[in-house]
Image (cartoon, rainbow, N blue to C red):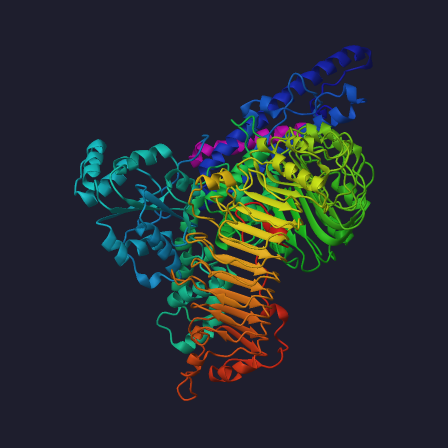
């Protein structure tokens, strides 16, 4: 309907035809003008973005600008809403105005064809073109357009008065004195350093090591305030470094990377010259450094331009054995400078954090005063998250504060709000934010929506960014938003904003989280307790609720963009009042996340969600959900649908209407997928891996031509229909179950899927009958597959089947880029030529399991793989003896003609785990030089094993379990200094002695009923932290150790012991009494088996998820 107030009116009924014509002309004129205004809104966003970028840093200090910017942001949100609403109406007309599929025009709005002016502020406006559907602009929308333009024009009049610029591109950092970091020097105070001994040792080892490379560059990278400069100072002033390097120079580079200035400082330190000609300076430097051993420290580098670095390093090339340390917060900097992997400096652990805080906070305090404040102090130290800068600043602030309430205020409030510390902590971290490119800033700030310690999934966060339009495709027209968003995330990680957790996910450091929340101000609100809804600001756009109590009323909100709700009890969400209060604010919602596993989501709730026209991201984790045929199918803007239900769920039949859906993730007991899913031509991700009741995909799966990621249900009963071979854009295929016959899952269907990457699992390989069939998979042409896992699931003994498996494995040769390889159920007698070939230089992890051929296996040709770090051998029945020639098979003709080449076996192997080898009898020797990097050796469940070699000196952890025939062990190779720290021996019932025991920190021995002696056991108390002896009735001290003991002269202290239990070892009772150790004849109630038996070893894998298979 046209805008009523602007329509011309007919004067009388006699002139109705004229009036009708005039009205039509007037409507067309007004509509054309409104369309121009609508296009102007798109350009308006570009101007708003430019002004916001210019004003961002000044906003911190100027209250007038702060208020002005707040109004401007609201206008920007209004513009986005109007453009988005118009786009929704266009899609609706296209969908609902079409009767047959044949008449349906293309629904892919090709944004790459739009003008750059419409690709601004992270929002791609779908404005009408001459070929697109045009709709009449309603009275309401027309009024909103006019109001927005008037409001914008009025606001922009103040721009000149506020002296704000309007310009695109990256803003040059503001080097305000209050925000700029003070320059560093090589001088330091050792008082401030705790917990960096290991880091210092590693850097010094690198600096003093001999290397054939020139100008070794060692980057130290980490979060602002973590102590990079301090570590560099420790190294620079070390006496060994001072003795080794004849020339040392320290330069604080800081934010402005000026080649001339840095070169002058180096030249002045070395040759005393103050020449102002760069060429002359560099020539003199090159001459002065020729043949010298020098050390440079370039502190606090931000430069990411390769040409600038090349210009600086020109005089240092080809002149000797120089070493350069650089400190930086960004891995992007290290990539252009490093000659070796960067040293990533982490935060301090809890105890070291407390020690540093205590040193600064309690300096000059009496012991009784310290005791009174220790509990609060430990909590404050923990709040600092191991960041030395914060620990020192807060500790120094509290040094003169003796009132408990002051300490409590520090504990409860944000550190940014403390007058005594904000000028120290805030600038150190804020400067990292200032250096972010403008397109990364909203992505970083949005992460503060989630609570502290939240574990981020990269894919989830990327989809949320896209839902809010933060990904700018300008100039990257052929790139998908997901690809560019991935680059955004990687860049934020390189700049130390996101940190890798121990489990491979990502987290924000607490102080970085505080920084993001400080910048977000009132736009982001995370309410962790529902008792305080009054604390929520009315302008909040992104809200995260974690339910703790019932909500009675909410404050008035504006237009909410994100609503994320977490409730594991579902008491609040079940209340209709909760929905009634919140849904009026959801009209502009882009993201809705509901995690309430006990909530029953009824049809009324689903229907209300279906009215949210702007919604782009919907995630529901509920107990049950009711849907009708058309439920949610009017969410035409929806990009991500993530649905998890613990009860059976029927999906809406009309899902094909969700034409913008890009990611569909289902975890529910649905038995079938709607056929209309195959109409989703924009779909990139289909994740049905946890739909256990699902048996097959729709037959028209080949229509999903843009599909990139397909995660299928686990289980051999699931069938993939023909057509998957046409999904040539597929990058992820979770696993592939082969079937007999050609109707389902033929291995040849993988041939054209050359874009597959990451992990690929192929099951039921017994259904492949020949090498030719296996070669049809064309695995050699898939360079992006990093982890390949091959499974035979039937045991077959006849010679024909064995020969067939050997041919099939030969035909499944992967690309040499593969990093992980797992083979399970293989019954062949030999291995193909590619297996163990040194050309597989990227292969770092191998797992071999359940080889059922009973014929003796004489070789596993793996020792020449240059990068192999992890090797797991499980249940290979044919292995009886591991000799020096076992790991490297040499053909007889080469052996006879002396073509063998001496090499170091397993040069990079760090972890070797051997489990359940029923026929393995001995491993007599290790060839000298082999296994030079082995750190962890696990041997378990080998009942016939009688002999093991002396362990390599590189070993740090050794575990042997359930090897009943093993009689003797020698733990230390006397040819080199031992590194062994942890030894676990369990259920070796014939073992009588353990010899050559080095200084250990961890020793566990259990159920070794014939064990009589452990060499140097008493002396180990000086270094042991954990000692567990259980069920060794014959174990006693060696006579030479006993001769030194007497109750009179034995000290009672237990050295470094943190945990010690001696149980059911009667010969050790007196020794325990002498050494004041806990002894009992029966297992104590508090000592459960898990505290005696070592935990399962789960080594870290460089890439992929091979570690999951260890379970």
Q: Nearer the viewer, residue 656 or 993?
A: 993
Q: Nearer the viewer, residue 511 or 978?
A: 978
Location of residue 220 in the rendering, given as x and y in whole percent from the top left corner: 38, 49
Q: Is residue 27 visible?
A: yes
Q: Which quarter of the picture shows residue 73? A: top right
Instruction: Please state the extent of the stretch shown in magenta in the rendering.
Output: 142-165
Q: Is residue 560 visible?
A: no
Q: Is residue 377 above or below residue 45?
A: below
Location of residue 333 in the rendering, given as x and y in whole percent from the top left corner: 40, 40
Location of residue 727 in the rendering, given as x and y in whole percent from the top left corner: 68, 29
Q: Residue at x 42, y 66 (%)?
A: 355
Q: Which quarter of the picture shows residue 99? A: top right
Q: Most prominent secondary structure in the magenta stretch? A: helix
Q: Nearer the viewer, residue 587 or 124?
A: 124
Q: Nearer the viewer, residue 190 or 469?
A: 190
Q: Is residue 304 above or below residue 963?
A: above
| The C terminus, quarter of image | bottom right
| The N terminus, quarter of image | top right
Q: Is residue 92 above or below residue 839?
A: above
Reply yes or no: does residue 158 show up in magenta: yes
Q: Is residue 92 above or below residue 846?
A: above
Location of residue 909 in the rendering, given as x and y in whole percent from the top left corner: 48, 50
Of all residues, the one furthest to the front in this rendering is: 896
Reply yes or no: does residue 672 show up in magenta: no
């Amino acid at each position: 309907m046209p805008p009523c107030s602007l329509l011309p009116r007919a004067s009388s009924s006699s002139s109705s035809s004229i009036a009708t014509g005039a009205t039509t002309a007037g409507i067309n004129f007004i509509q054309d003008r409104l369309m121009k205004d609508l296009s102007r809104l798109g350009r308006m966003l570009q101007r708003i973005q430019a002004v916001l970028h210019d004003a961002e840093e000044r906003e911190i200090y100027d209250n007038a600008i702060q208020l002005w910017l707040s109004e401007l942001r609201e206008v920007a949100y209004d513009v986005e809403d109007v453009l988005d609403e118009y786009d929704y109406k266009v899609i609706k007309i296209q969908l609902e105005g079409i009767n047959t599929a044949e008449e349906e025009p293309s629904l892919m709005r090709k944004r790459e064809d739009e003008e750059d002016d419409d690709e601004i502020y992270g929002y791609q406006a779908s404005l009408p073109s001459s070929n697109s559907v045009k709709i009449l602009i309603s009275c309401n929308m027309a009024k909103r357009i006019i109001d927005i333009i008037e409001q914008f024009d009025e606001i922009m009049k103040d721009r000149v008065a506020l002296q704000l610029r309007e310009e695109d591109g990256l803003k040059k950092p503001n080097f305000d004195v209050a925000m700029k970091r003070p320059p560093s020097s090589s001088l330091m105070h050792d008082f401030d350093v705790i917990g960096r001994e290991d880091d210092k040792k590693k850097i010094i080892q690198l600096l003093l090591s001999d290397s054939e490379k020139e100008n070794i560059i060692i980057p130290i990278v980490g979060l602002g305030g973590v102590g990079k400069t301090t570590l560099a100072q420790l190294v620079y002033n070390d006496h060994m470094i001072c003795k080794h390097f004849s020339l040392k120079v320290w330069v604080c580079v800081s934010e402005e990377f000026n080649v001339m200035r840095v070169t002058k400082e180096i030249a002045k330190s070395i040759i005393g010259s103050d020449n102002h000609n760069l060429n002359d300076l560099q020539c003199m430097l090159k001459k002065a450094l020729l043949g010298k051993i020098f050390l440079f420290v370039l502190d606090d580098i931000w430069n990411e331009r390769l040409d600038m670095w090349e210009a600086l390093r020109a005089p240092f090339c080809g002149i000797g054995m120089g070493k350069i340390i650089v400190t930086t917060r960004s891995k992007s900097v290290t990539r252009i400078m490093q000659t070796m992997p960067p040293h990533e400096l982490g935060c301090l652990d809890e105890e070291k954090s407390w020690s540093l805080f205590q040193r600064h906070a309690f300096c000059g305090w009496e012991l009784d005063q310290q005791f009174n404040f220790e509990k609060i102090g430990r909590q404050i130290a923990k709040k600092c998250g191991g960041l030395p800068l914060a620990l020192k600043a807060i500790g120094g602030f509290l040094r003169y504060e003796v009132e408990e309430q002051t300490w409590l205020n520090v504990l409860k409030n944000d550190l940014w709000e403390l007058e005594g510390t904000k000028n120290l902590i805030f600038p150190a971290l804020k400067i990292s934010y200032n250096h972010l490119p403008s397109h990364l800033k909203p992505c970083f700030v949005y992460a503060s929506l989630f609570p502290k310690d939240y574990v981020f999934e990269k894919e989830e966060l990327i989809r949320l960014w896209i839902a809010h339009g933060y990904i700018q495709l300008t100039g990257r027209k052929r790139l998908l938003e997901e690809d560019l968003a991935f680059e955004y995330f990687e860049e934020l990680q390189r700049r130390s904003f996101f940190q890798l957790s121990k489990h491979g996910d990502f987290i924000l450091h607490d102080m970085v989280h505080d920084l993001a929340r400080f910048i977000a101000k009132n736009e982001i609100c995370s309410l962790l307790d529902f008792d305080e809804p009054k604390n929520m600001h009315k302008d909040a756009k992104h809200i995260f609720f974690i339910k703790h109590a019932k909500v009675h009323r909410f404050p008035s909100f504006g237009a909410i963009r994100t609503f994320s709700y977490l409730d594991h009890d579902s008491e609040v969400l079940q209340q209709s009042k909760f929905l009634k209060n919140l849904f009026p604010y959801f009209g502009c919602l882009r993201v809705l996340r509901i995690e309430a596993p006990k909530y029953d989501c009824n049809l009324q709730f689903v229907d209300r969600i279906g009215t949210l026209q702007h919604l782009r991201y919907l995630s529901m984790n509920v107990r049950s959900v009711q849907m009708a045929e058309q439920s949610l199918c009017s969410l035409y803007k929806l990009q991500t649908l993530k649905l998890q239900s613990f009860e059976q769920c029927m999906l809406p039949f009309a899902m094909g209407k969700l034409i913008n859906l890009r990611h569909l993730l289902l975890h529910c007991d649905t038995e079938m997928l709607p056929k209309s899913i195959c109409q989703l031509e924009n779909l990139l991700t289909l994740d049905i891996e946890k739909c256990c009741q699902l048996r097959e995909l729709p037959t028209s799966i080949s229509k999903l031509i843009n599909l990139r990621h397909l995660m299928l249900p686990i289980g051999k009963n699931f069938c993939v229909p023909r057509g998957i071979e046409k999904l040539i854009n597929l990058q992820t295929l979770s696993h592939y179950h082969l079937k007999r016959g050609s109707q389902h899952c033929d291995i040849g269907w993988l041939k054209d899927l050359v874009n597959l990457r990451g992990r690929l699992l192929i099951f039921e390989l017994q259904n492949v009958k020949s090498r030719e069939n296996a070669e049809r998979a064309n695995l050699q042409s898939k360079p992006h597959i990093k982890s390949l896992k091959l499974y035979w699931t039937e045991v077959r003994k006849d010679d024909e089947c064995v020969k067939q498996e050997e041919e099939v494995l030969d035909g499944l040769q992967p690309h040499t880029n593969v990093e992980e390889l797992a083979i399970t159920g293989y019954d062949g007698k030999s291995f193909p030529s590619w297996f163990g070939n040194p050309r597989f230089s990227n292969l770092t992890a191998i797992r071999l399991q359940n080889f059922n051929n009973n014929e003796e296996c004489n070789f596993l040709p793996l020792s020449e793989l240059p990068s192999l770090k992890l090797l797991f051998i499980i249940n290979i029945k044919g292995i009886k003896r591991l000799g020096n020639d076992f790991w490297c098979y040499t053909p007889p003709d080469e052996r006879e003609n002396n073509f063998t080449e001496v090499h170091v076996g397993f040069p990079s192997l760090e972890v070797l785990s051997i489990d359940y080898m029923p026929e393995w009898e001995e491993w007599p020797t290790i060839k000298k030089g082999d296994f030079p990097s082995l750190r962890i050796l696990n041997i378990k469940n080998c009942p016939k094993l009688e002999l093991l070699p002396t362990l390599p000196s590189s070993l740090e952890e050794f575990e042997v379990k359930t090897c009943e025939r093993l009689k003797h062990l020698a733990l230390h190779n006397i040819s080199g200094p031992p590194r062994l720290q942890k030894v676990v021996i369990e259920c070796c019932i014939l073992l009588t002695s353990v010899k050559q025991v080095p200084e250990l920190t961890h020793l566990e021995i259990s159920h070794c009923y014939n064990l009589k002696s452990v060499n140097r056991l008493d002396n180990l108390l000086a270094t042991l932290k954990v000692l567990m002896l259980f069920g060794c009735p014959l174990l006693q001290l060696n006579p030479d150790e006993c001769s030194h003991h007497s109750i009179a002269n034995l000290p009672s202290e237990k050295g470094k012991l943190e945990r010690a239990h001696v149980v059911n070892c009667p010969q050790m009772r007196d020794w325990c009494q002498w050494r004041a150790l806990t002894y009992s004849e029966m297992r104590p109630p508090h000592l459960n088996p898990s505290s005696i038996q070592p935990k399962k070893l789960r080594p870290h894998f460089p890439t992929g998820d091979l570690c999951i298979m260890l379970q």
